[in-house]
Amino acid sequence: MRLTPEEIAAHHQDMVRQLEEAKERSERTTALFGLEGRDRMASLGLRFPTLKNADGVNPWNPERLVRWLYLSGAPTGGSTHAAKFLLTVWNSSEDWGLYAREIGIPEATWAPFNVVRAMGVWDEEHQAAFRLWCTYPFWP
């Protein structure tokens, strides 16, 4: 099937529009979260109110965040879900329970991040931080 010149032009315009939208989305993501992976993770983490003072969020350090989760006694339901979300964004294929045991937390077990449970626990500010990432997702 041959395309007409009008169909080719329309297809070209659609491709240009899609590229412009992708560029705008990328620029907005950079404006919201920064350029580099660790900076982006810290910026995302600081959007969750219960993580503002969590060790390992700023500067981003997943080992320290895991230690904070298991050993500090500070995490609440909301901050636990937020921390698990951050760790999943950082590396979704990591077995974070195994990682915790490898860094010296012998009894560590890990239930993966569950968005349904998290949304049921999180207040509006936590939900807004999550939705922002959903709108402008990034993976370091």
Image (cartoon, helix red, strand yellow):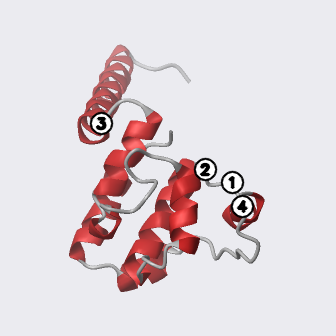
* Residue depicted at x 51% and y 48%: 61
* Residue depicted at x 34% and y 32%: 22
Compare marks 1 and 3 and give the one earlier in the sequence.
3
- Between disc 1 and disc 4, the foreground one is 4
- Residue 25 has which mark? 3
Report, in whole angstroms, how far the alpha carbon at label 1 lies from the one at label 4: 7 Å
Looking at this view, is 53 or 39 the one in front? Answer: 53
Q: Is residue 9 left or right of residue 56?
A: left
Give x and y (percent) for residue 133.
35, 53
Which SS class for mark 3? helix
Report, in whole angstroms, how far the alpha carbon at label 3 lies from the one at label 2: 22 Å
Give x and y (percent) for residue 36.
42, 31
- Residue 93 has which mark? 1
Give the amino acid at mark 2: Asn
Which SS class for mark 1? loop
- Between disc 1 and disc 3, the foreground one is 1
Q: Which residue is mark 4?
A: 95
* Residue depicted at x 25% and y 36%: 28
> Picture quarter containing residue 123?
bottom left
Report, in whole angstroms, how far the alpha carbon at label 2 lies from the one at label 4: 9 Å
- Between disc 3 and disc 4, the foreground one is 4
Give the amino acid at mark 3: Arg
Give x and y (percent) for residue 103.
71, 57
- Residue 91 has which mark? 2
Give the amino acid at mark 4: Asp
Q: Are the residues tagged 1 and 2 within 8 Å (C-beta)?
A: yes
Asked if 126 appears above or below 22 in the picture, the reply is below
> Picture quarter containing residue 48?
bottom left
Report, in whole angstroms, how far the alpha carbon at label 1 lies from the one at label 3: 25 Å
Give the amino acid at mark 1: Ser
